[in-house]
Every structure is written in structure tokens, then in C-alpha cells.
Image (tube, rainbow, N blue to C red):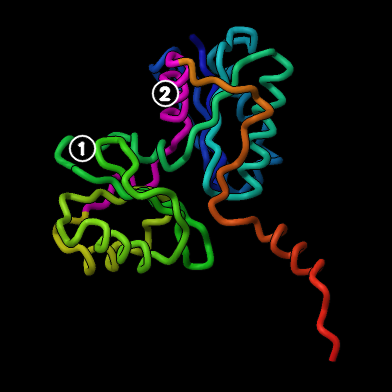
Amino acid sequence: MIILALDTSTRTGSVALLSGSDIIEEFTGDSLQSWTERLPGDLNGLLERNRLDISRVSLCAVAVGPGSFTGLRVGIATMQGLAFSRKLPLIGVSALDALAAVGTPNDVGLVATWINAWRGEVYGALYKDGQEVLPPTVGSPETFLESLREKLKNEFSNILFVGDGVPGCESLIRNRLGAEAHIADPVSPPLAGVVGRLACEMFTEGLVSLPDSIRPLYVRRPDAEVSQEQKKKPRKKL
């Protein structure tokens, strides 16, 4: 099974080509270009370099977030268009789930996944043995670390922090959690490959939905929606 996978949850993001669960090629794009400029060129280039026609693809996979609102919309729409036009199944995968599945060392009991949410906040979740312990939330790094303390009652056991929300917070993490805190290396790995692997597992288990049912996992409402709602509210008379 040839799988074409895409992650646009971050500015850098990545695309990957897999044969079953084996990654054929994975690469990150030019973060100086917008996703609108890079797609579908990055996907087409990936297929061309590996001398594969789109007709060989059996499954499409895309990260649904959380992350960049614009990136998620463009990425999901691109893969939906491809899936519809080629009559291919499309599977959406949480970027937080993907981060939790990236090369976790065997001696690490817990994985905290942080994606940059801007405004000094992170999208975060906590996993144990690949299973979600704390659901996706958004807030300051300090708030997330306090929720960890409350959830785990200070019984920390080798927590690995991974994701592009971690850089700049290393000192804070270690000051709060001490020697039990570990920072992944690389801290912000490409995710398209593992998105493809997780999609392969889901497809094998029959967890497939229609392409138009794939929706972004925002966690926090997009600024545009909040702005529109505020404009519709009646103004108080002076």
C-alpha cells in the first residue's frame, strides 16, 4: 500500500511517502513560503522524485491539528481534493497523537506534546504508553505544568517533552519538574511519516471515514470566528 501523507500543523510541516508502515521519503519544506504557495507542488515533487504516479497511491493521510489555522485548512482541503479526484480514502490524524508516537525512548513513561499556539501559549496533551492521559488543551506553559502536577500528584516519572512549543521553555520545564523532565532530540521532528504510519494502522482496523468528514482540530477557536462574532454583537448605547 502506497500512502501519501501531509502535515501542515506548523509553518515548516512535512510531506511523506510510505509503503505500508515503511517511510520511503519524508522531507520538510521551505518555511519562508506559505502553504498555499507550497501545495500541491511539494506533494507532486515527492512523487516525481520517487518515480511514482499518483495512480499508485492507495491511501491519503493528513494531520488535522491542532496548529496553524491557515495551514490546517489548506492542508486538509488539498488532501480532500486529491482524495475526491482519485477516489481515495483519506484519514485524519491528530498532530498531538503523532508527536506522542515519534521515537519515544523505552525508559520514558510519559510524553507531553506541545505545539506552538502563539500568544505565549501551547496546545498540549499528555500520553502514557501511547494512550492519552490528559486531553488536548490550550494555555500557557505554566498552566499546563501545573495541570501536570495536579494530575500526577507530584509522582513524575520521566516525562518527555516534544513539539515546536517546547523551545524557549526548557528552563521553565526543568525548574518545575526537575530531573524527571526530558527534552526530545530533535525537539520538533517532522510528523508526516508518523501520520502516514498511524493512518495505515487505522485503515487496517477499518477506521476510515469519508474525505469531506475530515475537520481541523482547532482546540481554540480561530481568531476570524471570534472577530466576526464580536462584530455581530449589538453595541451598547452611550
Q: Residue furthest bottom?
A: 238
Percent across and percent down for residue 118 are 52, 62
Quarter location, residue 213: top right
The residue shown at (26%, 52%) is 183
> In x, y percent, where is residue 76?
64, 34
Looking at the image, residue 4 sits to the left or right of residue 155; the answer is right
Q: Are marks 2 and 1 in contact (CB under 8 Å)?
A: no
Between 159 and 57, the one lying in front of the other is: 159
Q: Which residues are magenta?
A: 182-205
Estimate how packed mark 1 is, as few (under 14), some (14 to 19) or many (20 or more) residues with alpha carbons within 10 Å.
Answer: few
Q: Is residue 160 left or right of residue 187?
A: left
Residue positioned 65% across, 25% down in the render: 211
Q: The residue under label 2 is which amino acid type?
A: Arg
Is 212 magenta? The answer is no
- In the orientation shown, which residue stands out farthest toward the right? 237
Residue that mark 1 sits on: 105
> 208 left or right of 141?
right
Nearer to us in this view, 59 or 171: 59
* Picture residue at 45% right of the left edge, 63% below the top: 139
How far separated are the C-alphas under marks 2 and 1?
A: 18 Å
N-terminal label among 2 and 1: 1
Label of residue 197 in the image = 2
Residue 144, given in percent of the width and then of the height, sits at 36, 62
The x and y percentages for residue 208 are 54, 20
At label 1, the amino acid type is: Pro
> SS class of the residue under badge 2?
helix
